[in-house]
Amino acid sequence: MALGLTLTWLTLLILIPLSGLAVRSSALGWEKFWSIALDPRTLNALRISFGTAFIAAIVNAVFGIVLAWVLVRYRFPGKRIIDAMVDLPFALPTAVAGIALTTLYAPNGWVGQFLTPLGIKIAFTPAGIVVALIFVGLPFVVRTVQPVMEEIDKEVEEAAATLGANRFQTIFRVLLPGLAPAVLTGFALAFARGVGEYGSVIFIAGNLPFKSEIAPLLIVIKLEEYNYAAATGIAAIMLILSFGMLLVINLIQSWSRRRYGYGA
């Protein structure tokens, strides 16, 4: 019963829409599909979307581990407030996040006005896209790694110290290998969210073709131009690339689960 309901739900919400996209894309024909895929504007938009999402996911993986470690291992005033703030991007509308970040990092913004004299420009550049994706993706890493960290007994660290390991050796040789599956899961979730993010990005990106235009925005532009073939083709390319990268990440994750302990 439960299996049938699950399969029905997945079919209605995921398989049917994806099948419709595949059928619509196949109607383009290979020649037209490749002309859309190899269009310089499409390639550049895809490069920006996947490149910025990948960079943001790496940053979130590093600082997400640090933040999760602080929340699990330390007690300090305001800990509950910080722990609640981690979930803020989940509840905050993405458009609001984009407007807030643009206000902060614009050349005349609260933070941007100090960066501009240094020649650092965040808003209306790919760097602004990375900042927005870091903001929306950080909770995925923290909330994925945090429960696994809570299961790690402090005696493991004490045993490593007893055997002569210093702090860095304990972290990189004892703790991180066991956290690898959870970290990869958080990385994959943050990356997937970043690739498809739209609301928080369009305000801070500047949306300049060949400079700061993301693939989701290009799809919307094609739809507004009633160029449904191009929009469908770009969406299909994003689907193929996303599926391929997530498949590789999941294979690495499965390997790390078999090799190490805590994430199993």
Image (tube, rainbow, N blue to C red):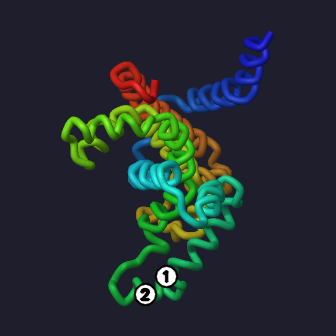
Q: Amino acid at mark 1?
A: Val
Q: Nearer the viewer, residue 192 or 12?
A: 192
Q: Is residue 26 above or below residue 86?
A: above
Q: Is residue 142 visible?
A: yes
**Are the two marked residues, 2 and 1, in contact with CB atoms closer than 8 angstroms?**
yes
Say the numbered circle drawn on residue 11: none
Q: Return the residue nearer the eye: 223 or 148.
A: 148
The residue to which callout 2 is attached is 114
What element does badge 1 sit on? Answer: loop
Would residue 67 appear left or right of 101 to someone viewing this image? Answer: left
Q: CA distance from mark 2 to mark 1?
A: 6 Å
Q: Which residue is mark 1?
A: 111
Q: Quadrant of residue 155?
A: top left
Residue at (54%, 84%) from the top-left corner?
109
Percent of width and height locating residue 207? 52, 66
Residue found 64% across the figure and 25% down from its top: 19
The answer to whether residue 52 is visible is no
- In which quadrant of the rendered view does residue 15 lie? top right
Q: Residue furthest left?
A: 164
Q: Nearer the viewer, residue 181 or 119?
A: 181
Instruction: Tell me the quadrant of the picture where the N terminus can be found.
Output: top right
Query: Against 23, is 135 above or below?
Result: below
Query: Given the current orientation, which residue lies at the most extreme front position?
Result: 162
- Residue 17: horizontal and vertical position, in percent? 69, 30
Residue 258 pos. (x, y %): 38, 19
Looking at the rendered structure, the kind of residue marked 2 is: Phe
Q: Residue at x 44, y 35 (%)?
A: 153
Query: Residue 262: image x %, image y %?
Result: 43, 29
Crowding at dot 1, Cα within 10 Å, few <14 / some 14-19 / many 20+, comes out as: some
